[in-house]
Image (tube, grey):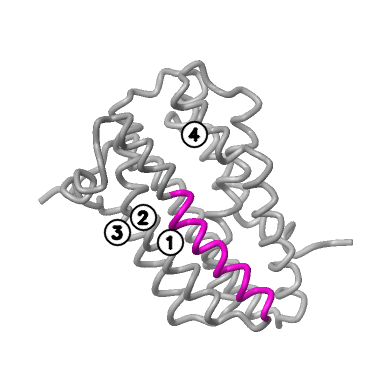
Amino acid sequence: MSRFRDELWRVVDGVYGRILVHPFLTGLTDGTLPREVFRHFVVQETHFLPDYARALAACGVRATSPAAVQRFAADCARTVEVEHSLHAELLAAFGLDQDDARRIGAAPTTVGYASYLLRVCHLGTFPEALGAIVPCYWIYARVGEALLEQSSPDPLYAWWIETYGGEHYQETVAGVLDLLDEVAATLPEADRARLCEHALTTARYEWLFWDAAWRRESWPI
């Protein structure tokens, strides 16, 4: 039986393929990624995650079933608590804390990605919001799963890979994909198309986020 998630994955699969061969990720697995590049990534994640949590909360507000509201409320709390703790530890590995990250500031791609998510999740319909947030869940899960097969000789990178390739995170993403299939089954074709458009945009932002870290992107002026 065909599932909507399979249709959606065909939309974003080309972007995902580009992500897997990006030098940021190949450098993670072979241990050659410069530490200053990973440091940039961690700092930008520290800026991005609070807005991602806000987008999840907004998605929950638009959800049409109590189970969906509960799911996004729980995932919002997990993002704030668990991933905040993870990134605090990663920052500490570089001798940084949250105040240091704030002083460094958010780079252009970070601001653009977060702003797009918040706009869609606050102003769009629930299916549009779902389309916008699913790639961040799903691509991280697929990347983590793929990278876990290789891990990394660098203990810090191996730890990051294990977080997103691990069973608990994979189960979380599976639940969101079940919800995606359920919601899409009742949508007219035009609404499914809009959902896919938002998903493609945020999948592209996922690539841009890793590429921005690789380039250690900063504001040009």
User: Is residue 150 or residue 6 the one in the foreground?
Assistant: 150
Please report the residue visible at 70 percent of the width from the left and 60 percent of the height from the top.
Answer: 175
User: Is residue 35 or residue 102 the one in the foreground?
Assistant: 102
Q: Left or right: 8 with respect to 137?
A: right
Please report the residue visible at 74 percent of the width from the left and 67 percent of the height from the top.
Answer: 181
User: Is residue 189 or residue 160 the one in the foreground?
Assistant: 160
Confirm or deny contact between disc 1 and disc 2 (CB under 8 A): yes
State the predominant SS element of the stretch in magenta.
helix
Report the amino acid beneath label 2. Phe
Judging from the image, what secondary structure is the residue with disc 4 in?
helix
Judging from the image, what secondary structure is the residue with disc 2 in?
helix
Q: CA distance from mark 3 to mark 1?
A: 11 Å
Which region shows up in magenta? Answer: 66-83
The numbered mark at residue 160 is 4
Q: Which residue is mark 3?
A: 111
**Residue 150 vertical position relative to residue 130 in the rendered view, above or below:** above
